[in-house]
Amino acid sequence: MLKPLPISPLPVSFEVEYQAPAYARLPVQRGTSTRGDLTALKHQHQKITMITAYDAPSGRIADAAGVDLILVGDSAAMVVLGHDSTVPATSEEMIMFTRAVTRGAHRPLVIADLPFGSYQVSDEQALESAIRFVKEAHADAVKLEGAGPMLSRVRALTGAGIPVMGHIGLTPQTATMLGGFKAQGRSAVKAARLYEDALALEAAGCFSVVLEAVPAPVAARITEALDIPTIGIGAGAACDGQVLVWHDLLGLYEGHAPRFVKQYAELAPAIGAAVEQYASEVRDGTFPEEKHTYAMTEEELALFEESLAEVRAG
Ligand code: KIV
């Protein structure tokens, strides 16, 4: 009779086992904190950290590093899929990226970017798209770009219980209308428009607003005026939080980097060198070594050789 294998009991749930890093400030368990916790951080003058991620390993690393928020940005279209703008990103692609991130990240809030064309048509379209991100990809919240006609989208989504992050300033999905990838709000009139848009997004129900490529003093005034936190990217240090794109921060993207990018590591050359070494070791036979292979017993090997000899003899 076969002896039963010793099986260790499975954890009741990952959440029970999971230990948040000591420096993580939002409560463990995604899905329990958006407007309240983030606004509390703002009022306590604690800076909010957000980073983009597009797959399970990056979600896991961002979680372990203690960031507050993960954005599955449609920047994926550029840094992952190789397009030259964010416009081609589709809901299917963004849902796949978001699903991967939510498999890897268990504590930070995961916010999914609604891609261009998935919410501009109508409130109903926006709602259908956002529901997919929540149901199929397990996003905690969604982000959309713009104000004006987008305010009714924010009301529709928040009315259905889906938290929304706004995004104004340089909005890459409509960069052509803005005259390219350029800083926004640099004249008094345009700065005042941004200020009004930010207030309107808050009034419509956003839990936070991204300010991208906006002069620092304009972002500072907007930040003072809002109760909800601002997350800046190229908008100065007065914002309540900051966001950077994963590939920019790690030196993985070899395209043009805007001036607001700070590169904290230079991984592309390190990765390139590792791949080069691998290819060269395969070619010269130094990889794989004994320790990378599996053995079999002498007896089994002898039996195998015998059976081969029989086959060969016919
Ligand atoms: O898509 C993205 O990564 C973004 C951030 C730059 C804010 O929208």
Image (spheres, grey):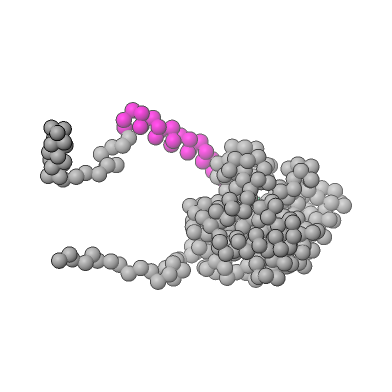
In the figure, is residue 59 to the left or right of 112? left
In the image, residue 283 lies in the stretch drawn in magenta: yes
- Residue at 58%, 50% (x, y): give it: 93
Front one among 99 and 256: 99
Residue 296 appears in the figure: yes
Pick out the residue farthest to the top: 284
Q: Residue 181, located in which quarter of the rendered image?
A: top right
Q: Residue at x 77, y 62 (%)?
A: 151
Q: Which residue corresponds to the image point at 72% horizontal and 67% vertical from the top-left?
A: 156
Q: Is residue 260 left or right of residue 297?
A: right
Q: Is residue 213 above or below residue 142?
A: above
Tag count: 0
Residue 22, position in %: x, y?
49, 64
Q: Magenta stretch?
A: 263-286
Image location of residue 204, percent across then percent down: 76, 67
Furthest residue toward front? 314
- What percent of the width, then of the height, locates residue 166? 71, 59
**Any magenta on residue 16?**
no
Query: Where residue 104 appears, x then y in whole percent?
Result: 49, 57
Q: Quadrant of residue 177?
A: top right
Q: Is residue 123 left or right of residue 111?
A: right
- Answer with left or right where residue 215 lies relative to residue 140: right
- Overall secondary structure of the magenta section: helix
Task: Tell me the quadrant of the picture where the N terminus can be found.
Answer: bottom left
Q: Residue furthest right?
A: 189
- The answer to which of 284 and 306 lies nearer the viewer is 306
Quadrant (top left/top right/bottom left/bottom right) for the C terminus = top left
| Residue at the image position 78 percent from the left and 53 percent from the top | 217
Is residue 50 among what the camera can see? no
